[in-house]
Image (tube, rainbow, N blue to C red):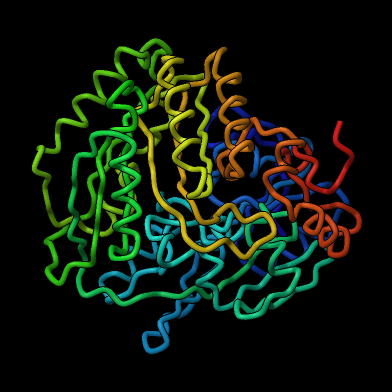
Amino acid sequence: MPTWAQKELQGWGRVLRSTAEVARPERMAAIAGLLTEGSAPVLARGNGRSYGDAALNKGGQVILTSRLDRLLELDEVGNWVTVEAGATFGDLVRTLVPRGHLPAVVPGTGFATVGGGLANDIHGKNHHCSGSIGQQLGWMELRTPDGQLHHLMGDEDSDLLRATLGGVGLTGVIERARIRTERVPSNAVSLQRERMGNLDEFLARLREEQDRTPYVVGWIDAMARGAQLGRGILELARPSEQGVTSAPQRTRRVPTDFPSLALNRWSVRAFNELYFRRVPAQGRTELLPYEKFLFPLDAIHDWNRIYGRRGFHQFQCVVPFESGAAALRLMLGLIADSGMGSFLAVLKTMGVPGRGYLSFPRPGFTLALDFPNAPRVTDLMARLESITCDHGGRTYLAKDATLTPASMRQMYPQLDRFSEVLAQVDPLGRMTSDLSRRLQLRGAAIT
């Protein structure tokens, strides 16, 4: 049985951190014992790519699942892959693409684990046509805090399944899963990039392409104002019949924390101008390996150190199509006026709602931006969250560090049902996290 040891853990944004007892099992058989041997609050943690406090458990226990990462089976006829929950999406892409397969849903980083992906009901650049990972689930095995193993079928609609998909790890420890793959003709996508002159043009093109292009994503210049508000780069990608000669992706590492003054309104504005101009006015098309297209930041290890020792916040919301243009216009104007614009800003459309009670995806526009952790950023985040609520949207718990219980309840109307399922499957409240306590996900009265 693995032993417990004290360790400080942090979110990927490096703003929130806490100390817990951690254990790192080498075999799946150890999970039941780790859950049942004590009475302390406990949580599973994959590769630590949640940005805030979703994978932190101050004063409790954390089971690290990153070594439970075996690929168990590839069904090349039925198009399914079975894996242990600690397997990363990057490993799956590198293993499956040479065999003509790709996970049907892949998040924006290959370092995320499948277990973490299910617990956050992750989505990718193809959500508008493939949904989130919950829509591509064959089955998963969940070990609840009492040590019982539950086999949850993806084509069923049980309360436990709906509480686990997007349930940020509070129903138990996901051990194994079977997820859908899709056939790919080569190791590459054909990527077309176009300049978008303003927000109206951007949103119109996103809606046009969502019915005919499998991968649609945009970079947005969050410093642009006036007539150029919302300008950016639209990326359209399709599987390519022609492959590319692809050596293993070269990686670099950020060796130290950048000075806090390195990212300011002038440096970000200069970067955004250069980034916008790197795509010619007539656009550009190229072939890219899947790994480079799907995980653009993974080639820079420890890129979160660019924001300095104080870390950063990521804000990601989804707002309905009906009110989305107005909401995004307010948000981008507020960000530009604040001078805290981001050079990492992503705009996409989303399709069908997620299946989980706390799933983030719903039809609409989703905007994600990074902000250095500075004194004024908390107020900015609060105002962005208020705009999101006022326009019927929600923010993404996997990225969150600042949401309030009241806003959580407004954004996620099925929270009460989620809390009821937790009370049934975990009446002692063993599975918990810093995020669940902050947002009172077990149904405590809002104060």
- Name the residue at 43% across, 67% down: 130
Quarter occupied by residue 256 = top left
Q: Nearer the viewer, residue 218 or 183?
A: 218
* Side of 405 where 72 appears, left or right: left
* Side of 421 where 395 appears, left or right: left
- Name the residue at 82% across, 58% down: 422
Q: Position of residue 198 (x, y in %)?
A: 28, 34
- Name the residue at 53% across, 41% down: 317
- In the image, is residue 177 above or below residue 210? below
Quarter of the N terminus within the rendering = bottom right
Q: Position of residue 410 (x, y in %)?
A: 72, 42
Q: Nearer the viewer, residue 122 or 406?
A: 406
Q: Position of residue 209 (x, y in %)?
A: 29, 58
Quarter of the C terminus within the rendering = top right
Q: Position of residue 327 (x, y in %)?
A: 50, 35
Quarter occupied by residue 190 = bottom left
- In the image, is residue 261 above or below residue 399? above
The tally of labels here is 0
- Name the residue at 62% across, 50% down: 45
- In the image, is residue 274 above or below residue 400? above
Residue 215 visible in the picture: yes
Quarter occupied by residue 401 = top right
Residue 49 visible in the picture: no
- In the image, is residue 208 above or below residue 403? below
Q: Nearer the viewer, residue 43 or 261?
A: 261
- Point out the residue furthest to the bottom here: 77
